[in-house]
């Protein structure tokens, strides 16, 4: 299917070069590089940010179609705070968080309060990641 850039603009699509835009925020460069390589190989345009502050700035600049945020970055609660700030900005893009906490995360963090669409567990499973993202952006 061929995309017309004028139609994308009218419909409010945030595509870049015909690709959906995904913002990835994580202070671990290995994780950022893994996400970028994986998502770019599947045809997504990836924007990286290494801090929550940088992530918020890039969110405002690029209006991504989807956001992936690490909850446990160097600064305590910076990932959770970024999610809250996106919600306060009335963000419409799905936000997924990365967590290494495991299945008990729902007992310590209120994902509804954060306004997130879901959680990806570290280490990341490529097939699950891509399946969820494709379904959400289709």
Image (spheres, grey):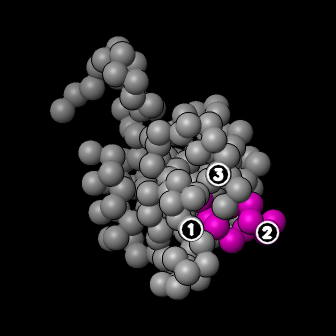
Q: Secondary structure at mark 3?
A: helix
> Who comes first in sequence, dot 2 or dot 3?
2
User: Camera-side residue: 25 or 32?
Assistant: 25
Which residue appears at 56% of the width and 68% of the height?
A: 110
- Residue 22's spot in the image, x, y percent? 49, 47
| The C terminus sits in image quarter | top left
Q: Which residues are magenta?
A: 68-79
Q: Which mark is residue 76?
A: 2
Q: CA distance from mark 2 to mark 3?
A: 14 Å
Residue that mark 3 sits on? 84
Which residue appears at 76% of the width and 48% of the height?
A: 53
Q: Which mark is residue 100?
A: none
Q: Which mark is residue 110?
A: 1
Q: CA distance from mark 1 to mark 2?
A: 16 Å
- Residue 16's spot in the image, x, y percent? 45, 32
- Residue 66's spot in the image, x, y percent? 47, 47
Closer mark to the observer between disc 2 and disc 3: 3
What is the quadrant of residue 87 in the picture? Answer: top right
**Mark 3 packing: few (<14 Cα in 10 Å), some, or many (20+)?**
some
> Who comes first in sequence, dot 1 or dot 3?
3
Q: Secondary structure at mark 2?
A: loop
In this view, 21 is above or below 111: above
Image side of residue 100 versus residue 134, left or right: right
Image side of residue 82 versus residue 11, left or right: right
């Amino acid at each position: 299917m061929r995309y017309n850039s004028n139609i994308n603009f009218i419909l409010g699509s945030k595509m870049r070069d015909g690709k959906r835009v995904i913002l990835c925020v994580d202070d671990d460069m290995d994780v950022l590089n893994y996400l970028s390589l994986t998502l770019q190989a599947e045809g997504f345009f990836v924007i990286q940010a290494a801090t929550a502050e940088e992530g918020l700035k890039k969110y405002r600049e690029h209006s991504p179609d989807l956001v992936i945020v690490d909850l446990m970055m160097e600064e305590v609660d910076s990932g959770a705070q970024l999610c809250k700030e996106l919600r306060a900005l009335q963000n419409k893009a799905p936000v997924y968080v990365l967590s290494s906490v495991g299945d008990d995360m729902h007992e310590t963090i209120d994902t509804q309060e954060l306004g997130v669409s879901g959680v990806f567990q570290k280490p990341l499973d490529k097939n699950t990641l891509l399946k969820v993202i494709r379904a959400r952006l289709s």
